[in-house]
Each structure stands twice: as C-alpha cells, then as structure tokens.
Image (cartoon, rainbow, N blue to C red):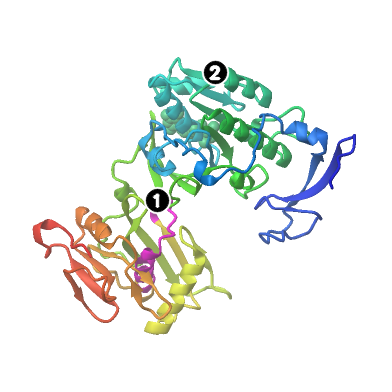
Amino acid sequence: MLRWGPMAKTKTRYLCKECGSESAAWMGKCPSCGAWDSLTELNRVIGKQGARALDGVKRRGMDPVPLSEVPAESATRGSSGVDELDRVLGGGFVPGSVVLVGGDPGIGKSTLLLQVASALAARGETVLYVSGEESPGQVRLRAERLDALEAKILFLASTDLDELREASLNLKPALVIVDSVQTMADTAQEGAPGGVSQLRHVTARLSALAKDRGFPLVLIGHVTKDGQIAGPRMLEHMVDAVLYFEGEERGAGRILRSVKNRFGSTNEVALFEMTGKGLEALSDPSGFLGGRHLQGEVGSAVTVTWTGTRPLAVEVQALVSSPRYGTPARVVQGVDPKRVSLLVAVLEKSTGMQLGGSDIFVSVAGGLKLDDPATDAALLAALASSFTGKPVPEATVFLGEVGLRGNLRPGSQVADRCREAERLGFKRAVVAAEAGDLPPLARRVDGVVALVDFCASESGKAASP
Ligand code: TYD
Ligand code: MG
C-alpha cells in the first residue's frame, strides 16, 4: 500500500514540450512523439502538499453508479453571440467546458473574445475577462473601437490564480475569459508563469473550477513559431476543445479551426475578416479561398471541401519544376505532405509523368488546411497541370479521393459539393465514375472519371447521388 510520509516529496519527471507526455528519465528524443531535445524537467510535489495544491475544488465523493441512473446532462449550449465561433464550437459553449484558443500574437484572439464578451453582456449575462497582458485602459480602448463597451463585462487585470478564482466564485459569471493562460500563476506553486508546471497547474485548477461551477472557460494561449514551451500544445489534452486562429501574414482573412472538440466536429472552420471594427464573418468565404473560375492558369485547380456543415470552394496550387541542385525540394502547405507524395507516385505510375525528381511546391489558398480526402482529385489535377504546362479545363471543379491504384472514389457529400460549385457559377464537376455513387446526370468518361454538367441539369439544380 502506498503511504505518504509526513513531509511532501518532490518527484522529478520529464515533460515533452511538444506533446506533453511524461517520462521518468531524461532522454534526447521524446519516446512518445519523437521530437528531439524537447524534454524538460518537471518537479512535481507529491504527498500531502501536492494533494493540497490541487484542492482548489472540493471533489464530490464518487462511488461507482449505474450509468443508466446518471441524470442526463443538460448540455444546453449557450451561443457565444458570434455565429462563426458557434459553428466551430459545434453550436456554442457547453457549460463547464474549457476551450483553448491558440494563435500567433496579433492574430486577433483578444479581439474575438472581447467581441464574444460584449455579445453575451449585451444579452444581460455577466462575463469575467481576466487579462494578465493588457491594462484596463488598453482593453477599454479596444472595446470602444469594437463598440463593445458593456457594463456586464467585468474586467480584472491580474496574473494571480487566486484572484481569478475568487472573482469567478463571487461573480458567478456566464463565461470566464483568461487572456492569456501563459500569464497566470499560482504563487503557491513553483515555476515561472508560462512555464510547464505553472501552465499545467493553472489549467488543471481552472478547469476543475469551471466544471464545478458550470461556467464555460476560455483560455487564450500564444503559440510561438517553433511551438516552444510557451505554446499551448501540451495543454491540448487537458481541455475540451482546442481552437487555432490562423491567418496569412498579410491580408485580413482569419481562419479559426478546431483541432480537438469533445462536443463537435473538428472539420469545421470559421472564416473572418479583420476590419476596423473587429472581426466580421466573411460574406463570401469561397471567394476568399480562391474558389473562382480559373482562366487558363497553369498549376491551379478548384475543389469543394466539406467542413462538417458547409461546403467551401477552394483553390489548390502546385508548382513542379526541375531541381537546381541535388535533392528535389518538397514544400507543402495546407495539405499533408504524405498525401502529396502519394499523389505524385500515383501520377507517375498511372500516367508515366516523371515528377519524382522535380521540385514540388503545393499550397492551398487562404491558408486553409485541407484534410478532406475528396480534395485529392484537385491536387492531382494541379500537379498534372503544372507538370504538363497545360491549364485545367475552365469553370471546372474536381471532386474525389484518389486511391493507390489511380482509381477515384467519390468521397462524401458529392451532391452538396456540386450544388455549391453550381451556385458559384462553375459549369462542370469532375467526379468519380465508381459504380453506385454516380450522380444521375453524370456522364461516364472512362472507368475512372465522370463529368457532371451543371448547365445540363434540370431546374438549375445539381443532381443528387
Ligand atoms: P489582438 O486581438 O490584440 O491579437 P492577439 O490577442 O491575438 O494578440 O489583435 C491585434 C491586431 O488586430 C492588431 O494588429 C490590430 C488589429 N485590429 C484591427 O485591425 N481591428 C480592430 O478592430 C482591432 C480591435 C484590432
Ligand atoms: Mg491578446
């Protein structure tokens, strides 16, 4: 049996900065994710003192109960007041849930959350906004600019976990926003704010509090370019949802996507534009993502990706060129490089195009990340177009997942994707010819592809499969 001694003991463990996994000994390479030189020392206090450190919330006595007798959780989601955010959250904030919003400094995290605070406060709900980064004056200025000055937004400039805790216990807010989790610290805990042990400790205590009191909690976190310690990546497994805010360095477009969501799909993306009055939903997402009619451009193709609740037309680009020096370069943005390698191999094998020795660059418009397999066909078309120097057919979208044999599978939501392409004025979709999944109006071209001509379809509607 395990007995605690009278004194607290310190146990040294090693935590990976990249993936957050722990090991008992220091190693040059993380045994879990394979990152080099990523293990840092974590002194964990065990024993009574350690238990006390975590007693922020009185735990309810827990005896096993029949699952069938557990009262159904009234997971009534509350809208965040920002529709695009609700979309990524899967319908709004779930009471007691913890959402981590990560992103580069200056991308718009504080702006978004202030807009959320203002929307909730305007509905009469109390929102606690804790900032360890900015002064009340700075935040007020931003709120004025956003037209978000609401009496029910209660602002606390603090970096002290206990102050934050007290404020949330007193105010019983409908939402607590912590900007940023890296600035918060528990004075009773060793380690600097933003360090591994403080970050984990603060997150654990705050989420226990949120769960106990039933308020949703938003933690804002900075990601440094190299995913360093300050990065919230190691917190990912401690929270319910992780949203990342991204955008191209120049340009006002912002994409918020979820990489983890216990309460919804992770395919969903929110698309915003940073304007003089804060973040606004993009009125024409497909336009922003390059879902336009290409006219004779070599190396580009348009596909329609499915994000969970909506189709988005997006342009993918490829550049295939002979390498100047030695090993060919592969620079891939917005898609998994392994998929590009696979598509290159399929092209070589099935068409004889020798791309393997070439430099290959691939990117997706708007900074979107595509992990939808049905976008393979467009990637393949863009690669082939760049290699041959011939543009893809005009006003055409490419849909379908490419198999190892060079076959094309339809992928999901073919009809919805076709409808979106038609709405945007595309004339034709290249889809999979695989039997059984062919839309009624599709013309089989060969064993692999079929064409759907939108103008030929009756009453202007794309065919459903
Ligand atoms: P901010 O929300 O402070 O970023 P983060 O919290 O992620 O560090 O956003 C900062 C940028 O947004 C800054 O460059 C100014 C710009 N901005 C606007 O363009 N319009 C606005 O209405 C606001 C408030 C900010
Ligand atoms: Mg900020």
Residue at horizontal 65%, vertical 53%?
Answer: 19
**Where in the figure is residue 272, as x and y percent of width and height?**
38, 40
- 277 vs 454, left or right, is right
Residue sitting at 49 percent across and 63 percent down?
336
Report the magenta residues as a range.
365-384
The relative height of residue 73 versus residue 36 in the rendered view (above or below) is: above
Residue 325 image offset from top left, x and y in percent: 57, 73
Residue 38 at x, y percent in the picture:
72, 53
- The answer to which of marks 2 and 1 sits earlier in the sequence is 2
| Image-based side of 404 in relation to 157, left or right | left
- Give amino acid for label 1: Gly
Q: Residue at left 24%, top 54%?
A: 420
Q: Secondary structure at mark 2?
A: helix
Assess whether mark 1 and mark 2 are in contact (beta carbons under 8 angstroms).
no
Front-most of 387 and 374?
Answer: 374
Whether disc 1's CB lies below 8 Å from ligand 1 is answered no
Q: Is residue 107 left or right of residue 294?
A: right
Q: Which residue lies at the image location 57% right of the left edge and 33% below the top edge?
A: 211
How would you rate the neighbour count of disc 1 (Cα within 10 Å): few for under 14, some for 14-19, many for 20 or more? many
Determine if the magenta segment contains residue 379. yes
Q: What residue is shown with label 2?
A: 171
Label 1: which secondary element? helix
Dividing the image into four equal quarters, which quarter contains ligand 2? Answer: top right
**Residue placed farthest to the left in the image?**
459
Q: Residues within 10 Å of mark 2 (few under 14, many from 20)?
A: few
Mark on residue 366? Answer: 1
Residue 51: image location, x then y, percent: 77, 35
Asked if residue 420 shows in the view, the reply is yes
